[in-house]
Amino acid sequence: MANTIKKIGVLTSGGDAPGMNAAIRAVVRACSFYNVDCVGIYRGYQGLMEGDFEELNARSVRNIINKGGTFLKSARSMEFKTIEGRKKAYEQLTKNNIDALVVIGGDGTFTGGVYFSQEFDLPIVGIPATIDNDISGTDFTLGYDTALNTVVDAIDKIRDTASSHNRLFFIEVMGRDAGDIALNSGIGAGAEEILIPEEDEGVERMLESLRKSKMSGKLSSIIVVAEGEKSGKNIFQLAEYVEEHLEGYDIRVSVLGHIQRGGRPSCFDRVLASKLGVGAVEALLDGDSKVMIGLSHQHVVRVPLTVAINGEAKYDKELRRVADITSV
Amino acid sequence: MANTIKKIGVLTSGGDAPGMNAAIRAVVRACSFYNVDCVGIYRGYQGLMEGDFEELNARSVRNIINKGGTFLKSARSMEFKTIEGRKKAYEQLTKNNIDALVVIGGDGTFTGGVYFSQEFDLPIVGIPATIDNDISGTDFTLGYDTALNTVVDAIDKIRDTASSHNRLFFIEVMGRDAGDIALNSGIGAGAEEILIPEEDEGVERMLESLRKSKMSGKLSSIIVVAEGEKSGKNIFQLAEYVEEHLEGYDIRVSVLGHIQRGGRPSCFDRVLASKLGVGAVEALLDGDSKVMIGLSHQHVVRVPLTVAINGEAKYDKELRRVADITSV
Amino acid sequence: MANTIKKIGVLTSGGDAPGMNAAIRAVVRACSFYNVDCVGIYRGYQGLMEGDFEELNARSVRNIINKGGTFLKSARSMEFKTIEGRKKAYEQLTKNNIDALVVIGGDGTFTGGVYFSQEFDLPIVGIPATIDNDISGTDFTLGYDTALNTVVDAIDKIRDTASSHNRLFFIEVMGRDAGDIALNSGIGAGAEEILIPEEDEGVERMLESLRKSKMSGKLSSIIVVAEGEKSGKNIFQLAEYVEEHLEGYDIRVSVLGHIQRGGRPSCFDRVLASKLGVGAVEALLDGDSKVMIGLSHQHVVRVPLTVAINGEAKYDKELRRVADITSV
Amino acid sequence: MANTIKKIGVLTSGGDAPGMNAAIRAVVRACSFYNVDCVGIYRGYQGLMEGDFEELNARSVRNIINKGGTFLKSARSMEFKTIEGRKKAYEQLTKNNIDALVVIGGDGTFTGGVYFSQEFDLPIVGIPATIDNDISGTDFTLGYDTALNTVVDAIDKIRDTASSHNRLFFIEVMGRDAGDIALNSGIGAGAEEILIPEEDEGVERMLESLRKSKMSGKLSSIIVVAEGEKSGKNIFQLAEYVEEHLEGYDIRVSVLGHIQRGGRPSCFDRVLASKLGVGAVEALLDGDSKVMIGLSHQHVVRVPLTVAINGEAKYDKELRRVADITSV
């Protein structure tokens, strides 16, 4: 019940994502709105074990809604994966009278949260934040929309050079297991071909497509490659292979790398963060636990964390079809 | 049936919106994919009546997916509102063997399309494009996501000055009948108060909220006002009223204006445009007509144009609640 | 002599400008480098009189180089214009053992600084920061380059609409006395005509130019108008006048307003701020006073504050010529 | 003399740079202003030899001032390095009655131009365009200012992650022989250390600096490395070396790559391009040849192409000093 929770802790964990600050802000403001105390926990589960805490009020989170990264900082913690580590963490919570946690992060963050919540009967609610959009039970994760804009912005720049020099560019984007970034940014940037982890159509298909394009009059092309792509070749080997088997293309490789994680969040991510942050505090006050606050068709939903972790990927096959048609 | 349509015309009409070019591109590419001819019609219904046409192929639309505005240009046409005008338009179509139309625009564009389609038994499919997001039957219209980012980007800049000088800014954003831009950009920009056309809570509520904020330690504030807001005062009068009734605030007004319509489309709008453009051609080839291609929970849907035009606004009351909580 | 100065105060005053934070950072870091204490003074001369101070060290200014506005805040102070006000300010300085001041701002800031320095024999050095670029003795003021980019970015967006609808846009940019913003952003945005405060060529010239453009095949046009322009008409009246005297143009007005002051500083402004901030501390340590640190042909120079204030404007007539040629 | 030149050809060659389109536009418009014909030559010297020409008038270059890359495209040509190649090129010129050339590019472009001009007594004027800013005789080359903004924008994003995770990032930026990009973007992005081709201070200095920073409380750091840096290690080896010799840092590498060449030009680059383009046509009409049009202290100057090519680099040592002071 709502009245048993008097103080909520909030932390960010795993890889940082744009919108984390906006989510922290919403959690803190919702606590203030419902007259619950709020404590910021630095450096994720690591800081939780070390008691690296700070009381936060509505004014503590001013002017952060538009900042990338997370001011609470994030870290990966090996120790929290042990029962001893989690015991230490629980002691810090009881010592500080923290009754419940909001954990902001991805897969690993939620897994740790489920264990911790079960072992110590602690109410925990998760907010999905990862640019990869690879969490089940929510249409979108925090940071994903911003990352898409960062990627198309970067590819737009590279396209200037590609079309000035009639070149073929291989561009690697993030996505170890999920092709969402590659597929959406590929369509958005007008890519010729898109290679994703969820399907391996073989390098031959790509060669065939490039040959056709060339004949149809395309002078420059962009191939977007997700880092977890399954051809068995890395992006430099892919480029080399194409260079060997296809004449008349001047080929370059660009690995976008870490710029994809940062930057001011898009309006979409800020609004999403605000909805999810409010939703997380309200779920805790409703007596819910071990749920993720997600978005389904614009509505805030509560999904068991176990579903969020174990659900299968939501790869949108329709997008592949759209990509094939719009790149003729 | 698909095989009766051999040539499709495409036009943009009404106010321009980011993503229109991407939608034209998708229509043209889908025509090419399905071996249907495609004709670009300049300046909307006006150009349709004048026969201002150009054949387009897959290569004609290269390097436009990332451009704002519409290369086919747009115009409002009085003449097309008359039966004589529409007759002229139909003659141009038959003279050029155009069997069907894709019309990209908003309310007015669809209304004209419905009349035209009924009178001459011409297959017409609509694509919703307007930054206001005020079309029923689709979760999002083209240009809306881009406009939100443009607005928060602008307010972020103004906030620099607001917080440097401890000022209160009234900022007018677009939205004559719909508060979607104001509500979302207001949350995204961390606004103190948001005034929208769909509800008039009175100026007193705003004064009360500003008084509370002041006491809680807020030094600067942003008020986002939709242009169609219902207080009966324009934004300059609103600012004056607050200045008179609230001490200690240095007040400024900024009308964002036309920058909100332009700019490179966001990734979201480019992908949306690609889906809708492909969907429009496929609907025509399926024998559909008088439908709008919309997006519902990430899926492309076909909605009768009459529903799109006459449906009631989708003002999201949950957002107002989130705004109130996150602005404490 | 260098060794007499042990503690330096730094403040920002007047209208805020992008790069002020970067300049404060450079002043603080340079103090740290030379083992001098540094004190941040909030809200300009107003905070100086009130003793609103905070000790700053090298770590206090982390992560601010890329933020718009000024974290020390700015304010205009009437009281400091009186001898009593300045006396109060001096007492605060002596009470806090502050030996010298770096004042960051424009004209008014420097004027106050000159009086204060003379009356109390206090070493004061100025850093020019104003988006208007209207200070003599320096090639560039802080914030000017960023403002130019903000303006062309905004006009690029408006141009999307202008060329989609074949419209003529009147766009008002900042610049009460100086046409630098209008002239440079006008050339950069490809404007048809540019109206500046330094010359009044009459509205007829503009009409003539628009007529010629129309005949040469221009379908849409941008007119950039500095707010201090001298035609005697405001921008809305100008637009109306043209509408009455020129047929066939659909005319719109946009006042860019406060977005021009904010935003993340450009690389140029950050480097300039770093150079000037270091230069200011070094000037004080060299025993200099009542000088502005400016930039002349990429070199840091020291210019008497009286020259900075009283010098005549540097309106670049060559730019007008380039504008006329490139807008044919 | 002016009256002997009736038709001017313009081409872009070498690596593309933002602002090339704006420069072409200015050349075309200036030709139109002075009633001289203008011919666009595609793909640099290669297209010159092949006669890949197109007549351009004032309207041909509308809406390109804000586009990255070069619509005339660029290419490197081996054949033009031979006297046979240049002969072919000259024949194309005479066949098309082209009397003079404006060549836009860098070092290699100018070298080719000098040979060609001498051998065939053809008036040639160069416009410096390269993001590296490594041309003598001009304060700035086209594209350099834009590239600096692209780089600091990218590093700002990476800094979000760096400071969220307390990491040390090595970031490689362009600059084979010139450290201008590294030095300016390094200062602008608040880098801890900057490694440039012009000086090799040894890896030990960097280690020492990092150790000091750590002790002074810095938790995250950015090291900017020019690609032509002289330590003898590539950026991945540098990172590894530091990882081995410095404890407690979580290290990452990011190679910014091709995004640095593209993108919409900054206002500075657009104005610079406009000045230089007009200046180039006026130089030819004045009877000048084998000169580069450069910028010196805001003024357009004419510099012998041989000076531009052979001059020594303008590495600004003062910047290194500012970098050292502002990174304490």
Image (cartoon, coloured by chain):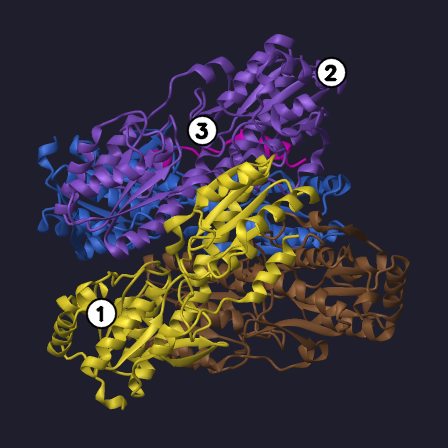
Chain colours: A purple, B blue, C brown, D yellow
**Circle 3 residues within 10 Å: few <14, some 14–19, many ≥20:** many
- Check the residue under mark 1 and report the chain it is in: D
Question: Chain letter of disc 2?
Answer: A
Q: Position of residue D129 (x, y in %)?
A: 36, 66
Labelled disc at residue A94: 2
Residue at the spot 26% in from the left edge and 54% down from the top edge:
A163
Q: Residue at x 47, y 18 (%)?
A: A308
Q: Which mark is residue A140?
A: 3
Q: Who comes first in sequence, dot 2 or dot 3?
A: 2
* Helix, strand or loop at mark 1: strand
Please state the horizontal and vertical placement of residue D292, each as a whole percent of the image.
35, 77
Q: Quadrant of the N terminus of chain D?
A: bottom left
Q: Are marks 2 and 3 in contact (CB under 8 Å)?
A: no
Q: Is residue A96 above or below residue C82?
A: above
Amino acid type indicated by mark 2: Thr
Name the residue type under label 1.
Gly
